[in-house]
Image (cartoon, grey):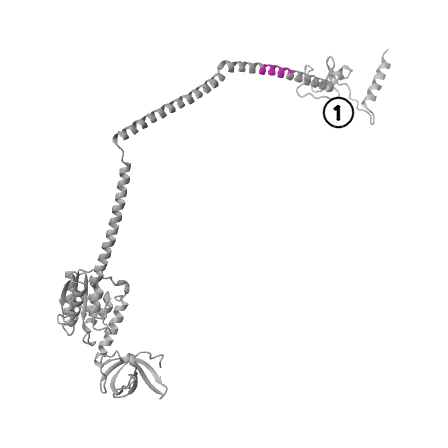
Amino acid sequence: MEEHFNVAWVTGELSNFARPRSGHWYFTLKDNDAQVRCAMFVRQNSRVQMQPADGQQVLIRGRVSLYEGRGDFQIIVDQMEPAGEGALRQAFERLKIELAAEGLFAEAAKRELPRYPKHIAVITSITGAALQDVLAVWRRRFAALTVTVLPTAVQGAEAEPQLLNALLQAESIAPDVLLITRGGGSLEDLWAFNTEAVARAVASSTIPTVSAIGHEIDITITDFVADLRAPTPSAAAELMVPAAQTLSSELAARQRQLAQALGARLRADELTLRNLQLQLVHPSTRIQQTWQRSDELSMRLQRAAQTMLSINRQKTIGLQKRLLGLRPEARLTAAKLDLLRLGNRLQQGLQRNLTSHAAALSNAARMLESVSPLPTLTRGYAIVRNNTDANGLAGATAQVISSVTQVSSGDSVRITVADGNLSATVSAVEPLPPGATPLATIETNAASAADAEP
């Protein structure tokens, strides 16, 4: 039960209320159908703004627990208020959750208050003690402050519209800071500062806003949306303006700092002035320095010109030497020598080529003579060709006869000997006997011819 009902709201009638010396409260909360024991310890009940008694209808908030000594189910109470405020408390919680989800309570949206405000507007009751407390603090701490009071009702049905109208008036006069304040009261008394319209108007205000509503234990929606919440009106007044004594001390310190800074600046400027005075040069001295500088530059120019002339002279001499080395006569003489040398080389080369070709020709002649048939013809041999024309001359298709099979009896042949040609007709064809050689046959024929001679 403690895990699942750690926060519970219960309403009912007080009964058997007891307050022992310890300061703790013990009572029973009942209705027509049931009852439950409750305990509220001194730390929590010291914040309750009502005097509980039997028979009162109350709304409590607490956590479910079990008193093991008696085995009793009970509620450990941390908040109590009259039952009539229960609906307001629930509406307060719902609006708080809704506006928080929209980011109206976010710290990033809070604006800083000006440190030295000149004009403050106060939205409060003109007859309330809160206004007098605030003004008394400001007269004591910051008497030069301009204060504009925008009087409104701070509770009741007319409070909400008057508060909204006062916020619009504050926008028109544009003070440096806006204070919304009133004295303490019950939740119902403070309800005008818990409405959604007032909360959104405060959140959308362009003026940094301070909320000081009720006493320190009183919390309103306006406190959450304001840029700063103060526990009491007097505390708000002190937070919004600096103390005159503090300002006087700060002013004196700033004056000392300014005097020191001015003194240091004057000393620095004096030193700079002295340095500049030392750097000042008399016009005649400046002219003399200019003349001297001009003479120095003139001499430097002359030296530079002489150096340049010397360099150019050396370059000219070098170029002349190169030009002499490139004269046409010398080049022509060298060319003639080269031509003569090349002519000699050409003649020698031609002679060598002629000698080489003559030797090659002689070798070729010897080789040709060694394979030529002419020497053979001088030794009594002959070359026989067939296919002679009508004049006995060999035709273009004449062939050398190397076999008896190439001719027949009656064919015309041409016979070449060492000193001429002979035309003849084949009268007979005599093949060699098998195994015989042409040389043996020739020798036999020759012997027969010799025998036949007379």
What amino acid is found at the position of numbered circle 1 in the picture?
A: Thr
What element does badge 1 sit on? Answer: helix
Q: Is residue 267 magenta?
A: no
At horizontal 22% and vertical 78% (from top left) the residue drawn is 87
Q: Nearer the viewer, residue 72 or 433?
A: 72
Q: Where is residue 128 drawn, in percent x and y? A: 14, 72
Quick check: 195 above or below 369?
below
Residue 390: which quarter of the image? Answer: top right
Residue 350 falls within the magenta-colored stretch: yes
How far from the left and from the top, in percent, is residue 48?
25, 79
409 or 314: which is nearer to us?
Answer: 314
- Quarter assignment of residue 300: top left
Q: 370 above or below 131?
A: above
Q: Which residues are magenta?
A: 341-351
Q: Position of residue 358 (x, y in %)?
A: 67, 16
* Image point (85%, 14%), residue name: 450
Q: Position of residue 313 (x, y in %)?
A: 42, 20
Q: Residues within 10 Å of mark 1 (few under 14, many from 20)?
A: few
Q: Main secondary structure of the magenta part?
A: helix
Q: Nearer the viewer, residue 262 or 333?
A: 262
